[in-house]
Image (cartoon, coloured by chain):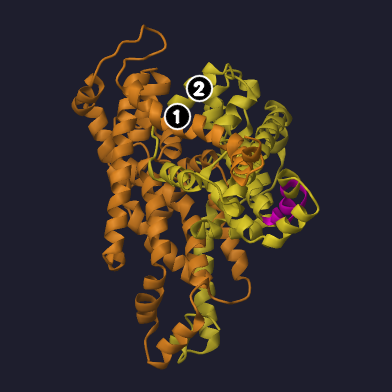
Amino acid sequence: MKSWLRSESFTAWAFMAPGLLFLAIFTFWPILYGIPLSLTDYSVIAETHYVGFDNFTRAFQDKNFTISLWNSLVYVLIVPVIQIVSILMAILVNSRIPGVKMFRAAYYIPVVTSMVAVALIWSWLLGHNGVVNYLLIQTGIISGQVSWLSSSSTALYVLMFITMWKGLGYYMMLYLAGLQGIPADLYEAGRVDGASSMKLIWHVTIPLLRPHILFCTLISIMGAVRVFDEVYILTKGGPGTSTLTSSVYIFQKGLEQFNFGYASALGLIVSVIIGALSVLVFRFNRKGGVNSY
Amino acid sequence: MSTMSGSFKPLKKGARYTVTYLLLIVLAVFMMGPFLWLLSVSLMPGRNVFSSPPAILPTFIDFDNYVQVWQFMSFPRYITNTVIIAGLGVVFNVLLASMTAYPLAVFQFKGRGLVFSLLVATMIIPSSTAMIVHYLTIQAFHLGNSYLGVVLPAAVSVFNIFLMRQTFLGVPTDIRDSGKMDGASEFRIFWQLVLPLVKPGIAVIVLLEVMAFWNNFLWPIVILEDPAKYPLAAALTYLNGQFSYNFGWIAAGTMISVTPIIVVFLFTQRYYMEGIAGAIKG
């Protein structure tokens, strides 16, 4: 016993104990506890009963849940757009010209500001009499004012745009780190062979960025499926259910209507979908999926 | 040499510069324009953001909005709340992440692989109901309506643990050996010899967490019953709800809340960017 207390194993576990305790309570427990919770009608107010799989059968008949899942999947459409735009941005800010660091910082500012502020600014800009409508009408792109956030045909896409706008700088920095790890002589060799700039990007840059593309695709998929803040602040799922995403719906069921059991069941279903999507991306990427962008 | 420059060889260097700068500026307008416009709204009292034609550039500058909104909203209180919450969050994250990461980087022990797989698993298996379970947990600990209740669910993150592990791997092993020769305990070696060497890693966590806690608005609203305890971002949503048509006040209040974090970012961006980029390697 005494020798174990002096062993490296004991010291290691003693160091990790506080951190692991917190992880157990606030990371592992939510994953595990959601399962039993989803089999009950726990609601704080009334008595709790075991209800079997009722919550799950109810979920698949719940039209709003199906709509919210669909909206969350539509949201994933921003993932390829984010990758293309942020890779191009990264190539641009990888130019070694004076002042480029200032531009990198400028593009990153939306990332560090709060979604509360970003949402407020865009809600004003996108208002019926707002600056965006004014500029688009002046340049002849649209003929009449559009209520971007309060019409059900545009609201979801506008939210997707805001999510993308706020995140671009983040992905740009990740790709920039990747670009700076590519040895310059690879480009030299390509140029000697007479390859064009586009060809160099396609045959040298993109393949070598593959780990970064995989990582960024994964985190942006998770971000898109779980999107919450901007939707909650700007539309709360409306108008109607046109921007109801799964996270917002789960939040409404759980922390607004205190339907913890049902909300947990919905959460489990969404977790399984996100897990499956992640596995899919891994598979896809292993089979040379990079070319599909 | 720029990596992409070769194919532009036929073009004059000047033309290439012009095209690049043009693109950089257009993009800067797209990314920064909305903030500059907010700044301009905040400096023009009485300006309606929905007037036609809209006021894009400031025609006059007046700080009345700032003075009035500062008198109306107790900013010092909300800023104090934010600082307390962010401070607690930073202390927890730095201590827990570095102590958990240290053995994973330098010790050989039983169960190391298990801990690793558990950490990775939490990154793959998402929990969409985390907030609901956190709410129940915090209530069970009787920490509702307290700063600790706001901070504890985010007291440690797997991301930070991997970040610190990466940093510890860069510390020479003979540091630990020399400490052992002098008879120092493992904890003293960690605290007095190793931690001072990983300050850059700690700086990254401090920055990331200050920003995360500064911008967090939803969880504080869920867990704090008393609005007087709200951090700035949460209080701002309240201001927006109360005075949805006093554009100048809201703009000024928003500027007050985002400026500190932008300034912190601009002064520390080197560390910050390194930390973000290090995430992939981890």
Q: Residue furthest top?
A: A47
Q: How many marks?
A: 2
Subunit under mark 1: A
Q: Which tag is nearer the camera, tag 2 or tag 1?
A: 1
Colour of chain B as rendered: yellow
Q: Can you say whether A3 is above or below A100 in the image?
A: above
Q: Is residue B167 visible?
A: yes
Q: Amino acid at mark 2?
A: Thr
Asked if residue B150 lies in the magenta stretch, the reply is no
Q: Do the residues bearing badges 2 and 1 touch, measured as CB atoms within 8 Å?
A: yes
Please, what secondary structure does the residue beneath circle 1 have?
Answer: helix
The disc placed on residue B276 is none
Would you identify the image quadrant in which residue B276 lies? bottom right
The residue tagged 1 is A29
Colour of chain A as rendered: orange
Residue, x 47% and y 52% (percent of image)?
A167
Please, what secondary structure does the residue beneath circle 2 have?
Answer: helix
Q: Can you say whether B93 is above or below B135 in the image?
A: below
The residue tagged 2 is B137
Q: Quadrant of the N terminus of chain A?
A: top right
Between residue B132 and residue B251, name the one nearer to us.
Answer: B132
Q: In x, y percent, where is residue A187?
A: 45, 84
Whole-number angstrom distance, CA of label 2 to CA of label 1: 9 Å
Between residue A56 and residue A249, name the one nearer to us.
Answer: A56
Q: Residue furthest right?
A: B182
Subunit under mark 2: B
Mark 2 Cα-neighbour bin, 10 Å: few <14, some 14–19, many ≥20: some
Residue stretch rendered in magenta on the structure: B190-200
Residue, x 71% and y 46% (percent of image)?
B186
